[in-house]
């Protein structure tokens, strides 16, 4: 069944460089904490569609948000909580490893798109499918960071 609604990806900036330039055990612990935080911050009407390595893919059916401002506020709140967690990780560690030293280089970006999608049941999972789902994922492949020097943004 085709739905209309809002599709959102919260993507950790710097994930690949962080993971490849760090000790895996400490890097995994930090990233796991941050991804769990993103899951905790996903509040109704948003629903988790998938975990995608360094990103949380969520959606809400059309009419779920009373106003567009509600979505903007949810994104802002998630970003504030994420940055606060990064700051706490930095303050609470004295470990000299690369993973712990590079925690401040992580940030968060959001991709938002309103469109159509299908809910496809595969076993116990529900996957989102459709052209607008593909478009949202294509938005993540951009040059905003390289062009503008922004590590955190919403697009």
Image: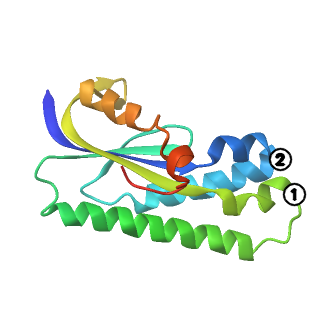
Residue tagged by mark 2? 23
Task: Indicate the quadrant where residue 113 lies.
Answer: top left
Give residue 103's quadrant in the image.
bottom right
Q: Position of residue 52 (x, y in %)?
A: 50, 37
Per the image, label 1 sits on a secondary structure element best described as loop
Q: Nearer the viewer, residue 143 or 41?
A: 143
- Identify the residue at horizontal 39%, vertical 33% (top origin): 137
Identify residue for label 1: 97
Kindly indicate whether the residue at mark 2 contacts the one at mark 1 (C-beta within 8 angstroms). Answer: yes
Q: Residue furthest front?
A: 147
Q: Is residue 80 above or below residue 130?
A: below
- Could you say which quadrant of the image residue 101 lies in? bottom right
Q: Is residue 77 left or right of residue 27?
A: left
Position of 61 with respect to 18 (left or right) is left
At horizontal 89% and vertical 63% (from top left) the residue drawn is 96
Kindly state the secondary structure of the residue where label 2 is placed: loop
């Amino acid at each position: 069944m085709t739905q209309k609604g809002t599709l959102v990806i919260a993507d950790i900036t710097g994930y690949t460089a962080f993971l490849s330039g760090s000790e895996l055990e400490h890097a995994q612990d930090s990233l796991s904490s941050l991804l769990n935080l993103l899951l905790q911050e996903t509040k109704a009407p948003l629903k988790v569609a998938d975990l995608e390595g360094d990103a949380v893919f969520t959606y809400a059916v059309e009419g779920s948000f009373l106003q567009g401002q509600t979505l903007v506020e949810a994104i802002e709140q998630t970003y504030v909580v994420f940055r606060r967690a990064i700051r706490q990780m930095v303050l609470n560690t004295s470990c000299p490893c690369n993973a712990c030293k590079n925690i401040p280089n992580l940030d968060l970006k959001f991709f938002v798109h309103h469109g159509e999608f299908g809910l496809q049941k595969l076993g116990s999972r529900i996957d989102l499918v459709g052209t607008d789902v593909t478009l949202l994922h294509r938005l993540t492949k951009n040059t905003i960071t390289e062009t503008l020097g922004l590590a955190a943004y919403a697009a």
